[in-house]
Image: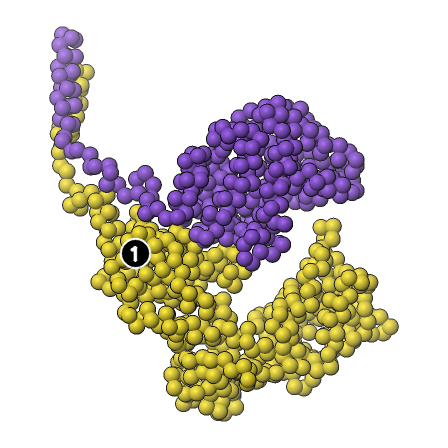
Chain colours: A purple, B yellow
Amino acid sequence: MHMKAYYIIFCLLLVTLAACNSEDPLENPDNIPGLGGDTWPPGPIDVWIKDSLTNPLNVAVKYKWDQGELELNKTLVPPKEETVIPVLSTIKQVWIKNYDLVAGEYFMKKYCPKFFVLVGSASWNPDGTVILGTAEGGRRIVLYDLNGFRTKNMPGYVPEDSATVKEMFHTIEHEFGHILHQNVMYPLEYKRISVGRYTSNWNNVSDEDARRDGFITAYAMSAPDEDFVEMIATMLVEGKQGIDHILGNIAGNGPNGTTPDQARAILRQKEAMVVKYFADTWKIDFYNLQTRTRASVEALIR
Amino acid sequence: MKRLLLYTIAAFFMLASCSKKDDPVFDESPDVRLNKVLAEYQAALAGAPNGWNAELRTANGSLYHFHFGFNDANRVQMYADFDTATAFERKESSFRLKALQQPALLFDTYSYIHILADPDARVNGGEFGLGLSSDFEFSLDSLAADSIKLTGRFNGSKMVLRKASVQDLQAWQNGQWKNALLFESISARILNYFKRLNVGGTAYEIALNVASREITFTWKDNGGVTRQHTTTYSFAGNNVQLGTPLTDGGTTITTLSNLSWNAGTASFQVNVNGTQAASIAGAIAPLIPDLAAPARWWQYMADQEDYWISWFGFHVNGVDDAFKIRSIPNFYYLIFFPEFNTEQGVTYDLAGFISLSGGSLGLEFGAAYRPPVFTTDGRVIFRYFGTLGDVPPVHEEKYLNTASLLNNTSGFYLVQTGATTYDMVSAIDAKAWISWQQ
């Protein structure tokens, strides 16, 4: 009896399923507007990006406005078309080419972040500070203030513009530093150098005060990872001389009571660990990379 | 019992699943309809041989005009009545139509329309981080035969596109709009703080706020009564159009047109209401001085034992911060402190240079003045008393220029520009002034 009851229910269920089969074919998905991203007839910028970045490095660049890629609460504007190729080609020169030269051509093909978003203006915070770059997940880098980007070869260049140029490469080298250590972690001893001095209050500390305590920038005080990549970025963009200059200018005790000599020793120790990490992990001669990168930066601003 | 329940439930399922009612509200699927709408807009935009006239009202209420020429390859050519350059040099950039929550028109690389929305206040005179509250991403609200209505998706500004005629396009190409925009360069050409529109024997003092496109007229009517009229203005071809016309007895001013700069007389020739010849020239004194303003300005801070601040110091002969006081390292602002202290029996006022040091503000040095003289014709005269503190030799020139300009024997007019903001204008020639705020 039980068997029979189940049998009937089973049959009923089959009928139910069949009843659901209403012939309602899905619409052709090719007709969904915007599916697979926006398209437009490629212009010179699109061709340049494809030839210079997408084909050799599998890097995509979004330079046309897409609110979905950006903070929804910020007033931002897209870049001027005439700035896109100059910025991207300097990025190639300063960053990609120099890594290619010291690490071999496959290194960047493998580790280069794959997606750049370009924004014309800086991103203004309510406190009046601005954001010039962000990175997410080792894949996406957002670069701001393209409309303010001017190298010495461009009309209207004034010496103050060098700050924007250096900041952009500082951002890129910083974010790329994260990608490297997310692939292979740096030695844990690094985290012990300044243990106990990392603080979320870093934004109220000046770079000068941070340096007196053995941090290369104030942002380096926020966490060991940031400390590590700020060292990489500052060393590459400022060059060996620049670092010597920064260390030479440390005067007076830090907020935590570090003496100038101690601060210098801490920074030199951090520098040595960065150099060793590049040599051991990536087989990269860091000082070679530093010399080349700084020379490329100087070619843009001096 | 249990079995019956199962049968019943199964039967219910069957009945429910058999309901094949498929009655969509629309004939076609959303995607088909969306594609159709986008194609319609694209055809309309690119199908206007002389392009489109556009009127954009920002969320702040200011009115700007554009001319767009769209094509079928996502490119747009643009004129704008933002300044004399944007009104004459056609700029190409990109646009695209996109299905966001509604069909939307995006100007997706930078062009003139983005100037208004740029968060960098140095570009448009608006606020940092906000600009002039405008948009470059619009939802398409309606499409009629020769007009398209749009709403900004970020700040909610409103734009209307109307099909342009050949004449409309030519008005940009042959420089009519550029000519009208000369109006906003009045302050660059006329170096005096006070500017007067002289029409039909009557003088109207005008004050322009370019960022908000507002103009204030001050004059005396036939009965000798002081009158004031503040209105927005906008451009229309060759015309400067007042939002609300000015009426003064039998005179009405609606438009200013045909502007031209006469370097010989240092004035603008202009037509009022299209035909009546008039001029705009500088003046060294206010048309109607606010006689009580100097004492009111001084007393306001004296009562509170507080001080006025100025971020940029003096503007002289068309140059902001002419004495470069902002180049003093860590300089914060210049203050004017009535009755700062008493020395040798003199209670003196102080013009002090304030800098940031060690996380707090400090008075570095300053110029002291004896109690000011208020004249009956509405001026205040400061008389130098001495220097407070030590002026570093590298900053001496900035200090001396500022201190001696304050010390000039003609003194200053005070113009109240807000509840607690004043402009202090040198009475020598009205070509130097400083803005004070609380």
Q: Tell me the quarter of the picture where residue A166 sits.
A: top right
Q: Is residue A99 above or below residue A159?
A: above
Q: Chain of mark 1?
A: B
Q: Is residue A73 above or below residue B209?
A: above
Which residue is depicted at the point 26% across and 62% down?
B48
Which residue is depicted at the point 35% across and 72% down?
B171
Quadrant of the frame with the C terminus of chain B:
bottom right
Q: Position of residue B51 (x, y in %)?
A: 30, 63
Q: Tell me the quarter of the picture where residue B264 sits.
A: bottom right
Which residue is depicted at the point 41% across and 87% down?
B276
What is the residue that sits farthest to the right in this orientation? B344
Q: Is residue B1 above or below residue B312?
A: above
Q: Position of residue B310 (x, y in %)?
A: 65, 66
Q: Position of residue B394 (x, y in %)?
A: 77, 62
Does residue A240 appear left or right of residue B189 in this picture?
right
Residue A60 seen? no
Could you tell me the amino acid type at mark 1? Asn
Q: Which residue is mark 1?
A: B71
Instruction: Classify mark 1: helix, strand or loop.
Output: loop
Residue A93 seen? yes
Q: Tell me the quarter of the picture where residue B181 sits.
A: bottom left
